[in-house]
Amino acid sequence: MKDGKKFLSSIDMINEWIGRVLCFLVVLITLLVVYEVMMRRVFGAPTIWTFETTKQLYAAHFMLLTPFALLHNAHVSVTIFYQRLSARIQALLDIISYLVFFFPFAAIVLWKGFYFAEKSWAMQETSWSVFSPPLYYVKTVIPVTAALLILQGLSVFVKRIIVLIKGGAA
């Protein structure tokens, strides 16, 4: 039991750390956008690289923070009826939802995302723009995110099973 709790807390800790570090990408993205606006509007010299760079950074930011959001129960949900239920019924509904929706969806994203990234690496895919940055790095974020999301989902799932069995909070 101790090893199981240690494993779950390790998953939580990894996604907590990734979330806390990557939240600062917003600062970098903002600085790049401000730089581009200044170059374009003030100096009349737009860059060819900032749009693609900010787009890829935002994609990585958005994707890699989804397990962090799951850890903190920050995803959008409609809880108008759910919040009125007992902790055990909520846990049961969560378990069913994870089995029917979450795990199959995340597994498909991992499978297809791996294929998508593998294909991109094989052809050394680049963007169609003049700047032409490599795309395989940002496409690799898809299966990495899916793997982290599955791990975080497993952590939440097991905690919900504990609530169902023991009652109360996990």
Image (cartoon, helix red, strand yellow):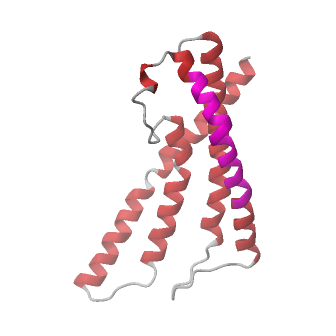
Place of residue 59 in the rendered image (x, y in percent of width and height, measured from the top left): 51, 62
Q: Quadrant of residue 111?
A: bottom right
Place of residue 26 in the rendered image (x, y in percent of width and height, measured from the top left): 40, 57
Residue drawn 52% across the image and 42% down it: 68
Residue drawn 55% across the image and 52% down it: 64
Q: Is residue 83 above or below residue 105?
A: above
Q: Is residue 77 above or below residue 134?
A: above
Residue drawn 56% across the image and 85% down it: 128
Q: Is residue 122 above or below residue 102?
A: below
Residue drawn 71% across the image and 48% down it: 107
Q: Quadrant of residue 42?
A: bottom left
Q: Is residue 109 magenta?
A: yes
Q: Quadrant of residue 9?
A: top right
Q: How many numbered dots are placed on residues in this image?
A: 0
Assign the N terminus to one quadrant of the image. Answer: top right
Principal secondary structure, stretch drawn in magenta:
helix
Q: Is residue 105 left or right of residue 37?
A: right
Place of residue 113 in the rendered image (x, y in percent of width and height, measured from the top left): 69, 60
Which range is magenta? 91-112
Q: Is residue 163 left or right of residue 74?
A: right
The residue lying toward the viewer, choosing from 28 and 165, is: 165
Q: Is residue 130 above or below residue 20?
A: below
The residue lying toward the viewer, choosing from 125 and 84, is: 84
Assign the C terminus to one quadrant of the image. Answer: top right
Residue furthest out toward the left: 42
Q: Is residue 14 magenta?
A: no
